[in-house]
Image: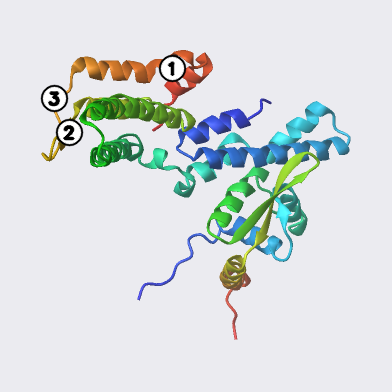
Amino acid sequence: MPDPLPELRERLLRAGVRPGAVSRYLAELRDHHDDLVAEALSDGLSEADATTRARQRLGGIDALARPIETDRRFHGWAGRTPWAVFVLIPVLVHAAAVVSVVLGLIAAARSGHAPGRLAPLLDAAQYLAGGVIPILGAWLLAVIAMRQRSRLVWPLAGAGVLALLSASVRLSLTAPVSGQPGEIAAGLALPSILHVLALILIAMLPVLWLPATLCRRFLAAGGR
Amino acid sequence: MPRATNPNFLNGVPELLVLRLLRGREMYGYELVQAIREATSETITLGEGVVYPVLHMLEREGALASRRQAVAGRSRIYYRLTPQGERRLNDISQSWERITGAIRNVLEGPRHA
């Protein structure tokens, strides 16, 4: 009789149950199983018979999975509303990050930096908003998707939207010169396809280093 | 006025047993299942793992509190009843007694004068 817990873990995660709830449930089941085995051994059963009896008393996979699978209170947001977790929230966080970058530029411009020193700051801001933030965001979405066995389409959609959005952001800065006020502008423009493709490729680079088993598990996730 | 219904009266059995057995004594899952087996003379036998979703749901709703304790190299989670759990136990017990009383009346058949 095979150990049912690894299969139970996969089934619950694919059903959208929160990884923390799954881990706790499995840890308690594992302890319970060990107690049942110890009880059976003390009754004089062999190791193999004790394990078989323990698994029978613990319950089958269906019986163990159904109460948690069917109770939405155990489900995480990524399971219940993947569109919000993988698309809406990243877009909002990216917008908030761009606003923060612009506010940072305004603060730097007001602090009386020489115009020559503001140009590298603008470059850094462009680099952050157009490259670093979306790539880190896409990596984070991939981690969430792997932990929760989400369908591949969701992190890909999120990464794609982030890449499009960040490649569309345009920041410009005119430094204040001799009494003339400066100007900081932020807007959206048609994105460069090369920029979008480069972001998507870089966002997918870590997949090359993932163990094959993890990749297969990720690609096999298809319940939600 | 709509009549109050009790569709969950059978589903509520594990919850009732868990709350009642944890009244006044904290226990971890395995201990609790053995207590259920003893208290019901093994009349009620569940897949033993099924007790954990009930415990987690009751804890989430504030009826139970838990604490971890390391015992013999393992981390056990002990559960105890909260004041909210006491109130819930009283409510469920009263409902259960009404239901079992009604069923008993049916089983005993109509009384004739």
Which is nearer the N-term, disc 3 or disc 2?
2
Q: Quadrant of residue B1?
A: bottom left
Q: Quadrant of residue A171?
A: top left
Badge 1 density bin: few <14, some 14–19, many ≥20, Cα 10 Å? some
Circle 1 residue: A207
The kind of secondary structure element at disc 2 is loop
The residue under the point 17% across, 23% down is A191
Amino acid type shown at disc 1:
Val
Amino acid type shown at disc 3:
Leu
The residue under the point 49% across, 22% down is A217
Is the residue A48 above or below the residue A210 in the image?
Answer: below
The residue under the point 47% across, 49% down is A73
* Percent of width and height locating residue A72: 45, 47
Chain containing the residue with disc 2: A
* Percent of width and height locating residue A107: 27, 41
Circle 3 residue: A190
